[in-house]
Amino acid sequence: MGRGATVPPYDRFDMAANLEELERMIAEALPGAEVRVVDEGGGDHLRAIVAAEQFEGRSRIDQHRLVRAAVQTRMNDGTIHALSVTTELPAHD
């Protein structure tokens, strides 16, 4: 950059999470799961709502760990700043 040039300000939305990518990452880690990821503000505060058979017999904390592990790379790179997780077993007819 030459003299007098300015560095553009950091745009936090450059790092906004791709919700579909995150849903795919969770679905791949938990095959058959029903997954929805929603933005709760700013593109980096998210909620994952996941219903999966893999949660059967696991504690709530272990269920959440499974979901977080699926998107850990996006947490590590700063794409996700905060992730709230809601888990449940799938509804059976």
Image: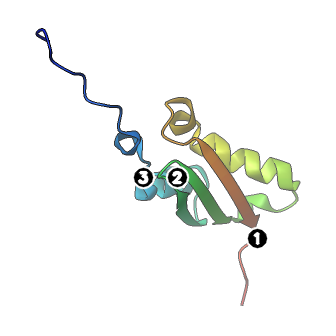
Q: Residue furthest left?
A: 2
Amino acid type shown at disc 3: Glu
Where residue 77 appears, x then y in whole percent?
Answer: 49, 30
Q: CA distance from mark 1 to mark 2?
A: 17 Å
- Establish if 51 lies above or below 18: below
Amino acid type shown at disc 1: Leu
Sequence-wise, the earlier of marks 2 and 3 is 3
The residue that appears at 70% across and 57% down in the rendered structure is 85
Sequence-wise, the earlier of marks 1 and 2 is 2
Q: Quadrant of the N terminus?
A: top left
Out of 83 and 6, give the one closest to the viewer.
Answer: 6
Q: Quadrant of residue 58?
A: bottom right
Out of 69 and 56, give the one closest to the viewer.
Answer: 69
Q: Quadrant of residue 82?
A: top right
Q: Tag 3: Cα neighbours inside 10 Å, few (<14), some, or many (≥20)?
A: few
Amino acid type shown at disc 2: Glu
Where residue 45 appears, x then y in whole percent?
Answer: 57, 51
Element type at marker 1?
loop
Q: Nearer the viewer, mark 2 or mark 3?
A: 3
Q: Quadrant of the C terminus?
A: bottom right
Residue identifier under label 2: 28
Out of 31 and 16, give the one closest to the viewer.
Answer: 16
- Establish if 1 lies above or below 83: above
Element type at marker 2?
helix
Q: CA distance from mark 2 to mark 3?
A: 10 Å
Total tally of numbered discs in the picture = 3
Q: Is residue 52 left or right of residue 61?
A: left
CB under 8 Å between callouts 1 and 3?
no
Residue 89 bears which disc, if any?
1
Residue identifier under label 3: 21
Q: CA distance from mark 1 to mark 3?
A: 22 Å
